[in-house]
Image: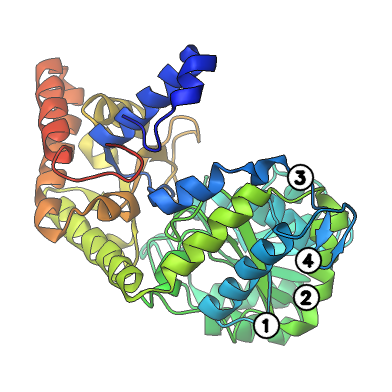
Amino acid sequence: MHQPALNALVDVDPELAGLVEGEARRQHDKIRLIASENYVSTAVLEATGTVLTNKYSEGYAGRRYYEGQQFVDPIETLAVIRAKELFGVDHANVQPYSGSPANLAVYLAFLRPGDKVMGMALPMGGHLTHGWSVSATGKWFTSVRYAVTKETGRVDMDEVRDLARAERPKLIFCGGTAIPRTIDFPAFAEIAREVDAVLVADIAHIAGLIAGGAHPSPVGHAPVISTTTHKTLRGPRGAMLMSDAEHASALDKAVFPGLQGGPHNHTTAGIAVALREAATPEFSRYAHAVVANAKALAEALVDRGFDLVSGGTDNHLILMDLASKGIAGKPAAKALDRAGIELNYNTVPFDPRKPFDPSGLRLGTPAVTTRGLGVEQMPQLAAWIDQVVDAANTGQDAVIDRIAGEVAELMAGYPMPGWA
Ligand code: DSN
């Protein structure tokens, strides 16, 4: 059952309590390979489920618009200090509600409507808020997009430089949501300097890897860093903006009062706890294990004939192109979910199919590594993925049901924070 126990919730709203219990069991029984998800610790869960949710705190510590901040001020200050120490930055703002609002605050801080932003195109692995057309950032600003090279699946920094020289954007984003390779922060910084743009490193996916020393840091290269807190960083759903001292005030003003009202103090507390956990040697071992697992899984998938964008991975994330397997991403993802293996269908670079029915699958190892799975289990995961994709192609429902049972049996041996 869910931990902490949902006693009051069961009394007041048994229907809702049942749904939460169901979700907890689902998270326990499945192999969760969604690259942007994780399991927070019980301590983080406890911090987010507190009376802090009752409090309004518009403003910043020591400068609030509501009284009664005797405890919220030190809580937010703890989170800020821990973020600064963990990442080695001058400034941190822990109030953005999530990644998209955090990135919107960056636009508000540095651009005026119509100004030019350069980011990685969404189908190439970038994020909606890096100027993609359906996002406010693509509607209200002029956006230009860089791609990956078709042959390598990697960003060609010469092409990025050429585009930046031709377009002279004011803001450049590096990072994204489906990038399996190391981001070259020094090269992006050199280009941004040359065209006099502000470089923003969106490290949402890799923040935990950076904190744990398993991916190079953008600090010293990107003056502005945006991240969510709930992916590899293993905190509650939230976000942070970090920067050098020069940009601190512009970012703070953009978050509040520019874009948001009161911060979610229960989330701030959870972020503070997660940052403390991320500063431990145990977390560094975790971050390296995430990458080792992803590399082992990628290798096992390649051995089984899967095509991986860029041929493999340097981080927590794998992007597979299923075209050669004769199945699209969506039916494969749905069959895998029925088999207890949860991931998401995803566009691959130069995808001939539509975004809602694309060719690829995106997988990641942050959550299974938190559960304690190691490189020795990755060939088994690849075998199940292979068998389910084959079963989905040939309509063998019995195979999918058998694997669902085997998956639940495996995961029963690995404890999950939040479940007992
Ligand atoms: N939804 C996040 C992800 O899955 O990568 C990005 O916003």
N-terminal of the pair, mark 1 or mark 2, is: 1
Secondary-structure class at tag 4? loop
- Whether residues under marks 1 and 4 lie with C-beta atoms below 8 angstroms apart, the answer is no
Q: Amino acid at mark 1?
A: Asp
Q: CA distance from mark 3 to mark 4?
A: 30 Å
**Which one is in front in this view, the residue at disc 1 or the one at disc 4?**
4
Determine the image quadrant of residue 310: bottom left
Q: Which mark is residue 214?
A: none
Q: Which mark is residue 90?
A: 1
**Which one is in front in this view, the residue at disc 3 or the one at disc 2?**
2
Q: Where's the N terminus, which quadrant?
A: top left
Q: CA distance from mark 1 to mark 3?
A: 29 Å
- For label 3, the residue is 136
- For label 2, the residue is 248
Q: Amino acid at mark 2?
A: Ala
Q: Is residue 73 left or right of residue 203?
A: right
N-terminal of the pair, mark 2 or mark 4, is: 4
N-terminal of the pair, mark 1 or mark 4, is: 4
299 above or below 29? Answer: below
Secondary-structure class at tag 1? loop
